Amino acid sequence: MIKNIAILGAGLMGVGLAQVFAANEGAKVVLRSRKLRDDPYAPIVKNLDIFVENGLLTESGKAALLGRISFTESMAEAVGDADFIIECLPEDMAIKQDTFRDIEALTRDDAIYATNTSVMSVTEIASKCRRKDRIVGAHFWNPPFLIPLVEVVQTEDASDEAVEACMELLRGVGKKPVKCRRDVPGFIANRLQHAIMREALSMVENGIADPDTIDEALRYGPGLRWPHVGAIEIAEMAGLDLTLNIHRYIFRHLESSPEPSPLLAELVGKGDIGFKSGKGYRVWTPERIEASNRGLREYLIKATRDLE
């Protein structure tokens, strides 16, 4: 049974994952950062306060969860006795490869390694390691303490045992793990998400609709159905014969460019990158950014509660 968890990287995803794994009463979670902030618990406390405010956690439960989390700058201390090690490091292939290679000498041979990469090849990340059979992908979605989905990626080298142990661990902390049978770029959900995004950005660029309209169409149309019926079930519900006829007509009209949107590239070139700059396709004031972030968290709390 997996009890000792090591998380490499104490950024946004790292602290979120610490909160997720520490929800298990028997867990011991060590979060490793190259340089600890003055109050490393502050981001986790902020996240947990959302649960307390919404009646999902008591103050005593919050204190108990925090008590199962510790921080260190020492890699050896973090991974030495770990059953499960997950990296939340920058999306830099060399950093991920070298980290996994270097920690092999510090960990037990039966430890399972996982990478939280959202798009990179897990096989390539594991390429410098000796025990490739123990390395899997475990892609959490942000914010990880609210979104149930975790994509578990099995490479050709990863053992069924390692994959199933990872999925069992995730189920035990209330997540919804899905198995990606092949190590392909973007795994499952990111491929779906960016296929939709490519069409959305193309429609803006070609003057079919403005960004607000496109986002509203998704939120108040197909987005309402997706928590209960997925894309393939919708096709079967409507009839695969109807779906085939629609595809024969519409596919030739959909965006199929293998290159990013030129308008997207133009905006990024000007430094208009969204929330971080205050402007993207739209203007983002601090108030509007705060409202968007707060609204997403409040929605996710309600939505995940309704799914239980």
Image (cartoon, rainbow, N blue to C red):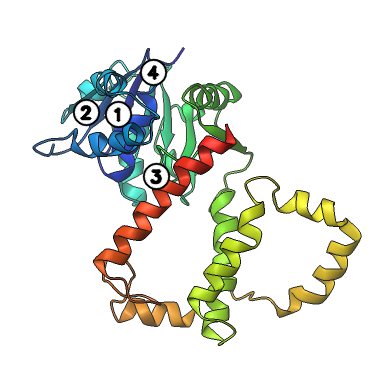
Q: Residue at x 53, y 43 (%)?
A: 303
Where on the picture, by quarter, is residue 289? Answer: bottom left
Q: Nearer the viewer, mark 3 or mark 1?
A: 3
Q: CA distance from mark 3 to mark 1?
A: 27 Å
* C-alpha separation, residue under disc 4 versus residue under disc 3: 24 Å
* Residue type at the position of mark 1: Ile
Residue pointed to by mark 2: 75
Numbered label attached to residue 283: none
Residue placed under numbered mark 1 in the picture: 103
> Residue 136 at what x, y percent from top left?
49, 34
Name the N-terminal-most of marks 4 and 2. 2
Separation of marks 3 and 2 at Cα, in angstroms: 25 Å
Residue identified by numbered label 4: 83
- Which structural element holds mark 1? helix
Q: Amino acid at mark 2?
A: Met
Tags 3 and 1 touching, CB below 8 Å: no
**Residue 98 image offset from top left, x and y in percent:** 31, 40
Q: Which residue is mark 3?
A: 143
- Residue at 26% in and 43% down: 11
Above or below residue 50? Residue 265 is below
Distance Cα–Cα, label 4 vs label 2: 15 Å
Asked whether 45 or 41 is in front, the reply is 45
Neighbor class of circle 2 (other Cα within 10 Å; few <14, some 14-19, many 20+) is: some
Q: Are marks 1 and 2 in contact (CB under 8 Å)?
A: yes
Residue type highlighted by circle 3: Pro
